[in-house]
């Protein structure tokens, strides 16, 4: 699978181009390996695919539109990994920032890469979730249930390996109404691919202020601890990364 690595903050136009290229390469790679009857990729006499300057139809309605300075809806309701009903606002205390990642737990690739990279980036900090900040993963697949969230949490708590930080990491699921509102509030757009039975989507850690204002988007699947700490510091101070 191909990746672009860490994507630094870009202008809206540049970011959209980068997300498009990443997703196109991802889909192209999957298609190359799943081509029926041609495992060696040999020529089959069919016309060549469209060039990379043409946006594939599979990616219509996919990407991230940055909404810096906008507020997330604190009243949105989800289920935590224990199956308890919680509001998004319950993770904000007015003092500490919150990192939000929109993923889906049964994702075969990109979501895992994103969460792996974020976990590694956070391991490079001398701050702990639950003390200086909160981490909230939200599944955008309404079919997923709290037990999947619980499994993901256990896996990443084992990898993070800092006992006592469990209360700072949260893996949520929700119904379609709350998911749609959440995705709209942060500009996240995903699309179900019926043929491959998976979601086409982009990847970003969304850093929000203690009052729930979107401060910065950290795009990609690899996160430099210095960048993460800077983003958390700025969010704590209420700064917006324009």
Image (spheres, rainbow, N blue to C red):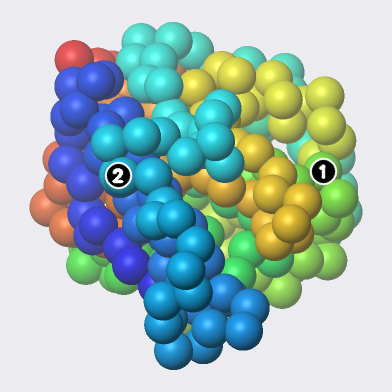
Image quadrant assignment for residue 53? top left
- Farthest residue to the front: give it: 45
* Residue 82 badge: none
For label 1, the residue is 142
Point out the image quarter for the C terminus: top left
Q: Secondary structure at mark 2?
A: loop
- Residue at 63 percent across and 78 percent down: it is 36
* Residue 52 badge: 2
Vertical relation: 12 (above or below) 175 = above
Q: Secondary structure at mark 1?
A: loop
Vertical relation: 109 (above or below) 219 = below
- Residue at 64 percent across and 26 percent down: it is 182
Vertical relation: 74 (above or below) 85 = above
2 and 1 marks in contact (CB < 8 Å): no
Earlier sequence position, callout 2 versus callout 1: 2
- Residue at 17 percent across and 58 percent down: it is 224
Point out the image quarter for the N terminus: bottom left
Q: Position of residue 44 (x, y in %)?
A: 49, 74
73 or 20: nearer the eye? 20
Residue 97 in view, yes or no:
no
Vertical relation: 22 (above or below) 116 = above
- Farthest residue to the bottom: give it: 40
Comparing marks 2 and 1, which lies closer to the viewer?
A: 2
Instruction: Tell me the CA gap for discs 2 and 1.
Output: 32 Å
């Amino acid at each position: 699978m191909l990746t672009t690595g860490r994507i630094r903050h870009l202008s809206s136009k540049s970011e959209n181009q980068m997300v498009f290229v990443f997703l196109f390469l991802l889909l192209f790679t999957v298609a190359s390996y799943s081509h029926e009857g041609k495992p060696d990729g040999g020529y089959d006499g069919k016309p060549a695919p469209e060039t990379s300057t043409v946006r594939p139809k599979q990616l219509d309605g996919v990407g991230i539109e940055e909404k810096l300075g906008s507020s997330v809806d604190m009243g949105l309701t989800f289920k935590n990994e224990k199956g308890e009903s919680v509001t998004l606002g319950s993770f904000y205390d007015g003092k500490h920032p919150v990192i939000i990642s929109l993923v889906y737990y049964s994702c075969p690739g990109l979501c895992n890469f994103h969460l792996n990279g974020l976990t590694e980036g956070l391991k490079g900090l001398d701050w702990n979730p639950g003390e200086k900040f909160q981490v909230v993963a939200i599944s955008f697949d309404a079919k997923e249930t709290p037990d999947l969230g619980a499994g993901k949490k256990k896996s990443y708590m084992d990898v993070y390996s800092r006992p006592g930080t469990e209360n700072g990491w949260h893996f949520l699921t929700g119904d379609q109404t709350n998911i749609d509102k959440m995705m709209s509030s942060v500009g996240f757009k995903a699309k179900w691919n019926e043929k491959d039975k998976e979601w086409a989507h982009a990847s970003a850690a969304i850093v929000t202020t203690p009052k729930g204002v979107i401060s910065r988007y950290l795009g990609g699947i690899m996160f430099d601890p210095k960048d993460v700490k800077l983003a958390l510091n700025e969010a704590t101070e209420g700064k917006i990364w324009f």
